[in-house]
Image: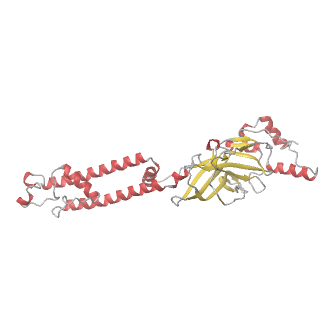
Amino acid sequence: MIKKNGLCNVKQPRSHRQRFFVLSYEKLVDSSWTTTLSIFLAVLFLSWTCFAIFYWLICFTHGDFEPNHLPEVQKINHYKPCIYDMRGFSSAFLFSMEAQHTVGYGIKAPTDQCAEAIFVNSIHCIIGFIMQGFMAAVIFSKMTKPRVRSQTLMFSKNATISPRNGKLCLMFRVGDIRPRYINQTKVRLFLIKSMKTREEETLPHTQTELKTHMDGCSRSIFFNWPIVMYHILDQNSPLYYLAPSDLCQQRFEIMVIIEGTDENIGQVTQAKSSYMPKEILWGYRFENLIKFDELREEYEIDFSKFHDVTPVNTPLCSPVYYEQYAKMQKNILNASPCFTLDFTPRHSLGELPTFQISRIQTAQCKI
């Protein structure tokens, strides 16, 4: 549903006319500056040339290019042309450019001698006004679009599952490579999977929001350095009853959305990414990438370690069985949980051997 670059992998059909106008504007905004400016220059020269041909034809049919009707002898012969100071196509091209952009050098101007010249000049002014407004809108959108800011937001390549404060948690790392910060940052997490209702209706892409945490923050976060967000796999989580083997066999997607206000332009920016089951590392956690420089007395962030993970002891069973066995050992044996489960780290959920999957399905946890 969501690609790693944040683009939505869903195609919505449009009518041909709507598709042309909408996609043209979107492509101009999303394309590079070189491409956009090249298209603008080509369109401007094309419009100047086309209307210059119209003006030249009007003056030619009216006889303004005859030797006795040239600008030098018009006063002597008492001749009034369609457009003043027209000598050929070069003059028509200059007049077309001046009329479209309302330059007005003070010499070339249409007269009331030719109605067709007045009509073409009126249409030319309207089209030129629309073109300039469209180009200004595209340039303004390119300069202020939030997508440029969202490209500086980073997501870890993988998500991890490991214990934190005695509970299994789904964790991922987010960061911002720009020195300017995003205010009122919010991180939202969604589980997208197919579900069946009691009426046997299949819902292909059901969205379930997962509660995210970052230390003691549950809403807005202070996003001045890379942080590790986590979702607790407790009884309120839809992943509470899923063991590693179940995650390997089921098809789902975890979508992450970061939203905040850019302090430079004051616009809301949003970045998206997602994690598939094969991108979830069971039994790993993220390495620390922040260190304190005692010489400079400042903290340094090593973004080269942004995606690095390290193995950690993690039971290969579902969170519900993990908590049940922990409570049983604590209540019956009056002792701390005996972690004799299988803690072998896995590179991904899809790399569990066959014999371990069958053992997990039958016994769930090994004591």
Q: Is residue 67 left or right of residue 162?
A: left
Residue 97, compared with residue 349, is above or below; it is below
Quarter of the image containing the C terminus? top right
Kindly indicate the quadrant of the structure image that contains residue 139: bottom left
On the image, the x and y values in percent for residue 326 come to 86, 50
Residue lying at the far bottom in this picture: please name it.
Answer: 112
Residue 107 x %, y % = 18, 59
Q: Residue at x 27, y 52 (%)?
A: 48
Q: Is residue 233 visible?
A: yes
Residue drawn at point x = 72 percent, y = 41 percent: 310
Q: Residue at x 25, y 56 (%)?
A: 98
Q: Residue furthest front?
A: 295
The reply, left or right, for residue 319 in relation to residue 194 is: right
Residue 293 at what x, y percent from top left?
A: 65, 46
- Residue 240 vs residue 309, the one in the foreground: 309
Q: Nearer the viewer, residue 365 or 98?
A: 98
Q: Percent position (x, y) of residue 36?
A: 40, 48
